Image (cartoon, helix red, strand yellow):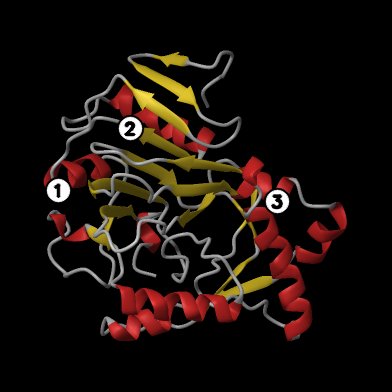
Amino acid sequence: MIAVTDQVVQDGTLTIRPLQPTIGAEISGVDLSRPLSAQERDQIKAAILEYKVVFFRDQNLDQDQHAAFARQFGPLYTHPSTTKAAPDKAAAIHKIAATDSKKLEKLLAKQQAEGWDPYHSDTSWRLVPTWGAVLRAVNLPDVGGDTIWVDAGLAYERLPEDVKERLEGLHVTHDYRDALVNAGQDYPIVAHPIVRTHRETGKKILFVNFTEHPWIVGLDQKESRELLSIVHDQYRKPELQVRFSWRPGSIAFWDNRAAVHYAVRNYGDFPRLLERILIADEPQYADL
């Protein structure tokens, strides 16, 4: 881990500036378009484990450079909504595009009916979700379109003790089948523990995906809704969040096991576009 004694931390060749006490840091002093040294790679990974999400500015990468950077942290994962191709190609790039107005209205109506803000982690619908995500700005509105990340470990720590006891041992569903069927894929509905233990840090985290129709297994609708609302309220607390304003050349790299995120849709019909690459966790389980 990186010891933080001042607002700005110099770690070898990198400068790491925390944005919030436990989540979010900007890293400078590195050119992501070229291969990293082992020291640089390890420093970036340590910063991600410490701050859950890190940001780079003024990094003008193309798709191949984006993929090459992400590949230094593990095998790339090709999302079902992208075109299947050889793993050493840029097919793992997933376009995060602004939804057209009709689709957006339908999506917002469905979310409003369920009553949840879309805080989520990527590929939580898999038995073994991807561990990391690298998101690159491509086409941005002049203003708006920020992304929020939540420290899911701190969200757990700040829960009352009686709520922690109630959540212990419970599992929640992650149901992505509607989107998968539309992409010509299928996958069974998975239930993960609400309170997960991070494999590398050992910290407990709150792990609920509010875009995937969460339901706590074994509980009736009223009690499931009550407990999920407590988690939802934790995610929404500003003191547990970092908010990032994109600009050309921006890159975000986060630990998908330690943070949930929320894309702010306040830019109208602008064709906002970011490109994301996911990094698979535990190669022996990568196909699960």
Q: Amino acid at mark 3?
A: Tyr
Q: Amino acid at mark 1?
A: Gln
**Residue 56: mark:** 2
- In the depicted structure, whether residue 27 falls above or below residue 190: above
Q: Upstream in the sequence, badge 1 or badge 2?
A: 2
Can you see residue 43? no
Residue at 34% x, 78% y: name it: 103
- Quote the CA–CA distance across marks 1 and 3: 36 Å
Can you see residue 102? yes
> For numbered disc 2, what is the local secondary structure?
strand
Q: In the figure, residue 99 lies in which quadrant?
A: bottom left
Quadrant housing the C terminus: bottom left
Mark 1 residue crowding within 10 angstroms, few (<14) / some (14–19) / many (20+): some
The location of residue 81, given as percent across then percent down, is 26, 72
Q: Is residue 128 left or right of residue 134?
A: right
Mark 2 residue crowding within 10 angstroms, few (<14) / some (14–19) / many (20+): some
User: Which of these two is toward me, 147 or 33?
Assistant: 147
The location of residue 73, given as percent across then percent down, is 32, 42
Q: In the figure, residue 247 lies in which quadrant?
A: top left
Q: Is residue 159 left or right of residue 56?
A: right
The location of residue 95, given as percent across then percent down, is 24, 60
> For numbered disc 3, what is the local secondary structure?
helix
To which residue does mark 1 refer?
Answer: 63
To which residue does mark 3 refer?
Answer: 156
Q: Upstream in the sequence, badge 2 or badge 3?
A: 2
